[in-house]
Image (cartoon, rainbow, N blue to C red):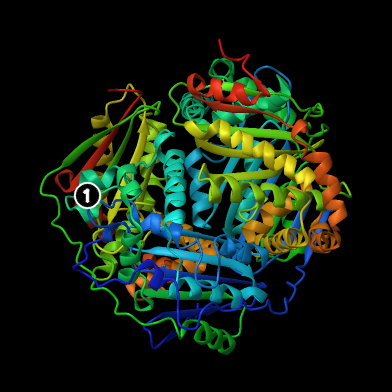
Amino acid sequence: MELHRLILDNGLRVVLAPDTSTPVVTVAVHYDVGFRSEPMGRTGFAHLFEHLMFQGSESLPKLAHFRHVQGSGGTFNGSTHFDYTDYYEVLPSAALERALFLEADRMRAPTISEENLRNQVDVVKEEIRLNVLNRPYGGFPWIQLPAVLYETFANSHNGYGDFRDLEQATVEDCAAFFDSYYAPANAVLTVAGDFDIGAAAELVHRHFDDVPGRPAPKRPSFAEPLPDRERCGSHHDPLAPLPAIAVGYRLPDPSVELAEYTARVALASVLSDGDSSRLRRRLIYRDELVTDIGAGLGMFGVPYESRDPDTMIITAIHLATVPAEQVLHTVDEELAMIVRDGVSEDELRRTVARWSSTMYRDHDRLATRARTIGACELLHGRGELAAELPALLGEVSSEQVAAAAASLRPEARGVLTVIPGGVE
Amino acid sequence: MTAAEVTSRSAEEIGRTALGPRPLPPLGQQRAGRAPAFQDTVLDNGLRVIAVRRAGVPLVELRLRVPLAGTHRTHAARAELLATTLLAGTVRRSRAEVDIDLARVGGDLGASVDPERLGLSGVSLSAGHDVLLDVVADALTAAVHRTAEVRTEKERLTAHLTMARSQPRTIARLALQRRRYGDHPVTRELPEAADVADVSPAAVRSLHRRALVPRGSLLVLVGDLSPARAVDTVAAALAGWRSERAAVELPPLPLLRGGDVRLVHRPGAVQSQLRLSAQAIPRTDARYPALQLANLIFGGYFSARLPENIREDKGYTYGAHSYLEFNPHGATVIVDTDTATGVTAAALHEIRYELGRLVLVPPDEDELESARRYAIGSLSISMASQAGLASTLAAVATAGLDLDWLRAHPARLAAVTRDEVTAVAAEFFAPTAFTGVVVGDAEVLAGPLAAIGGIDLSELD
């Protein structure tokens, strides 16, 4: 994968990833702001603001953004994460300039009105009812686990937001948030797919050069000390039929300790990737303790998706007759075996092969490719990073996986238990 | 935010520049995608195989569809257990060995069933696609459904059923199927726990032998492959998969007729599921492209009338959709949204209003052109990835169509006239043609819903 880069005078970083094999193009913009930058009393604001960025801009009345993307044959979306917010369009390549125009217009001059704010507060509340309040295991574990594992407001609060906070959001809040965080110098523009590099660069300049420059905000450190004891919390889920558990461990910072981070990707894969994995064989099929179990990196299960601090997670849904302690104890036994004996060469090779396949599949979906490149460029300074994971995994040794397993000590983790069924 | 951090402009200042609004750039000249090489053939065991070369990344995507309908009371339970134990071990591979062999070639393979068919969906590195096919062949011809594995999967399936039945969307789906089709086998999307308990390992093995057969089934391979060689590889790998029987299609479905919307009680629900449905026409009907566009204009994409009304104007919902659902005998249209309990009756009223409006106020040229470009563009996007092309192709091939039909579809969409859209809208989107369900807190909903009428309260006590 060959990436071409530009930096505009207003500070916007641009990554071009050409591929003319299909007549489709993706434009993605990643802004360096997510849940962690929300102030106290404004939980959920980053996501609410993401909705407002679709509500019109100087050249585009309400509804026009959607209509222009879809009316050009494309699809679109946006998403909000712990450390970033992204927006993207996938379109037939003839619509490339139009997509750049749409993104530039809202980066330059979005329309923020009281009417649109109130409308989107209602829509976001419906989204939260749909995905959290009216659904068993809603928000499990990404909403509830941070509150158990982390202490600071930035790292621990609910990124979807409390209804009360959402309702209190004002137009002035939105204006201040935009001016602080949506500066071009705080964003990465990624263009992937069917285009000529020179022509695409010219279009980028044409539409983004006159987005006024503002200083990028100084990014605070979100670091906090590692837990010095096991942290436990529980969540009553009145709609859930079975108990569940989520165990969170702090990850090494991939920008500082990439090999240690990669060893944990391998460990998660050895633990739960497929029916030959250690936790599935032991806890589902041999001991019959859980109905499902998984291990992954990041609150949404995607490696490299956050800056430090980030979380490795093991989740399981278990039978009501099985105590959570037994699930934890059995996981610890399996980890201890890896600490003692390491993992086999074949397990490591399988991990590399499966991740190669996953990376190729992500790369083949142009939207996923552009969004992954943009996120890695923004968070870790290198868009190439995601595609390099299989090669990095090829360097991981059994000893490194054993060392990673050894770091998953009970006193270093947060344990969330989900108590099912209408418990008051 | 904290005013000390930044001296912010006002929202008005942010929203305008000295230059003022700028014109929307025109679309460029669209080039067509390259026509992929492919083979579409029926093997002598009766299996239809479609192999398409799309070499973007070194992977091969696999989709297998075996019609697997049944009318027996416990068919759904047997079919679920057949699927969950299909990859759990063969004569020569244990469950773990199936996964190990797949993993070594970057492979992934999953089985699923619904009332119409059993499906296998998989992927592997292209260099290892012979292993992927070998595992598939091994499962189809030599899965043993060991007694211990069937017992384990019965326990897990029972837990999964409990989980599925606690999901509002599943509750609503099952209620819609009952409302549309009574006790027809198509409604048995989830088996009953009691039926699962009744199924013996022998019954699972027997269903496998009788029903999991090549004649009438479809295998799609898309990826970095040579189509002719891939067909040969499939023919060799699946040479032992034979049966005198043909795969069993779903019994004919009654045509949907309009009727009252049934209220289904879900105590204390903070949000309601609205699901309406009417009879439609399949892809093979000459009017299908026009119906596809009419559906888009109504609720088939974000820029449609229904979501612009009940989401972007009124804030009743996060999403409002309409889509066509196909079965072996035809198609239906489904309108789908979830809304807060307090605005559920108002949302139903707006859905009916928009249905009526589609009949009485036909789409204008802009609406039609937008839907047309979206239909053509989103098809090209879905065909741009190996996985998307494999799934899209499997869906249309199940209806007896092929890759040439898919590639010619943009021209069909381009030829649709406003009069044709107006005609199908009037026929298929009339409010009186729809039946459906609302699932929610009936103690709050019954009053307002009864007040707007067309509501069936018979399922309440």
Please say whether residue B234 is visible from this viewpoint.
yes
Quadrant location of the C terminus of chain A? top left
Q: Residue at x 14, y 45 (%)?
A: A411
Q: In this figure, what is the number of numbered marks? A: 1
**For the residue labelled by badge 1, is the local secondary structure a helix, a strand or a loop?**
loop
Q: Is residue B460 left or right of residue A160?
A: right
Q: Is residue A98 left or right of residue A148?
A: right
Q: Nearer the viewer, residue B325 or B204?
A: B325
Label 1 crowd (10 A; few <14 / some 14-19 / many >=20): some
- At label 1, which amino acid type do we have? Leu
Which corner quadrant of the image does residue B270 belong to? top left
Above or below, comparing residue A376 to residue B324 in the picture:
below
Q: Residue at x 55, y 88 (%)?
A: A202
Q: Residue at x 55, y 65 (%)?
A: A61
Which corner quadrant of the image does residue A317 belong to? top left
* Residue A291 point in image, percent of width and height: 42, 32
Label 1 belongs to which residue? A408
